[in-house]
Amino acid sequence: MKKNMGSADKLVRVLIAVAIAVLYYLEMISGALALVLLAFALIFLLTSLVSFCPLYTIFGMNTCKKEGK
């Protein structure tokens, strides 16, 4: 697994996941919508931790800064 996520991308994903968790905690979202959003939040957190997004690979994207040689 080669890293394909930059630090700004990871930060945005973590912030979105935290926002979803807060909305759930405050009971502003519930039911099936809450479960779907919590699943996305979990995926966002996991991909941020490993700096790899499988969808980026499929679409040929890379937000990582290139390493200097």
Image (cartoon, rainbow, N blue to C red):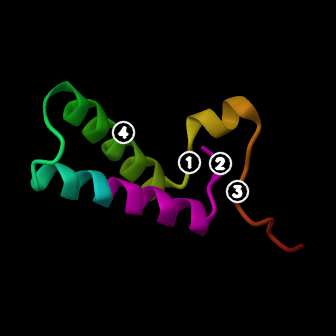
What residue do we see at 80% from left, 69% from top? 67
Circle 3/circle 1 CB separation < 8 Å: no
Residue annotated with mark 2 = 2
Name the dominant secondary structure of the magenta segment.
Answer: helix
Residue annotated with mark 3 = 63
Tag nearer the camera, 2 or 3: 3
In this rendering, would 1 be left or right of 59? left
Tag nearer the camera, 3 or 4: 4
Magenta part of the protein: which range? 1-17
Q: Which amino acid, mark 3?
A: Thr
Circle 4/circle 1 CB separation < 8 Å: no
Q: In what quadrant of the picture does the C terminus appear?
A: bottom right
Please tell me which residue lies in front, 24 or 66. Answer: 24
Q: In the figure, residue 65 lies in which quadrant?
A: bottom right
Circle 2/circle 3 CB separation < 8 Å: no
Q: Which amino acid, mark 4?
A: Phe
In the rendered image of this protein, does residue 55 appear above or below residue 22?
Answer: above
Asked which secondary structure carries label 4, the reply is: helix
**C-alpha span from label 4 to label 1:** 15 Å
Q: Residue 48 at x, y = what percent?
A: 46, 56
Tag nearer the camera, 4 or 1: 4
In this rendering, would 51 be left or right of 57? left
Q: Residue 19 at x, y = what percent?
A: 30, 58
Residue annotated with mark 4 = 40
Residue 52, which numbered label?
1
Asked which secondary structure carries label 3, the reply is: loop
**C-alpha span from label 3 to label 4:** 20 Å
Identify the residue at the far bottom of this view.
68
Identify the residue at the far top of this view.
32
What residue do we see at 49% from left, 66% from top? 11
**C-alpha span from label 4 to label 2:** 22 Å
- Please tell me which of labels 3 and 4 falls first in the chain: 4
